[in-house]
Amino acid sequence: MQPALVLADEPTGNLDTQSANSVFDLLREISSGGTTFLIVTHDPRLAARCDRLIELVDGRVQSDKATVATRPGDDGRQAGST
């Protein structure tokens, strides 16, 4: 079964960092097969790894932007740069 959409409310909320990274890697793997994940999180590190970020304040959309997804430990620099 490959659902078109999965709603995930704080999927890594109670996990240690290594387990959270493993879960997110699994979500990424599943999404490469065509499943879309709508993730609710308060974790800015998890949000930075998503393709799109929609921020809500008091139930209203404050911002909606595409992001450059990062990996854990990625400081945004390209290999070879200083």
Image: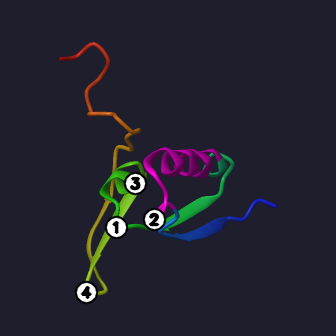
Q: Secondary structure at mark 2?
A: loop
Q: Is residue 32 above or below residue 81?
A: below
Q: Which disc is residue 42 wearing?
A: 1
Mark 3 → mark 4, Cα distance in angstroms: 21 Å
Residue at horizontal 34 percent and vertical 51 percent from the top: 45
Query: Looking at this rendering, what residue extends furthest in the right direction?
Result: 1
- Choose between 65 and 31: the one closer to the eye: 31
| Marks 1 and 4 in Cβ contact (< 8 Å) | no
Where's the N terminus, which quadrant? bottom right
Vertical side of 61 occupied by 2: above or below? above
Say if mark 2 contacts mark 3, CB within 8 Å: no
Give the SS element for disc 3: helix
Q: Quarter holding the C terminus? A: top left
Task: Tell me the kind of residue under disc 3.
Answer: Leu
x 29%, y 23%: residue: 78
Mark closest to the chain's N terminus, 2 or 3: 2
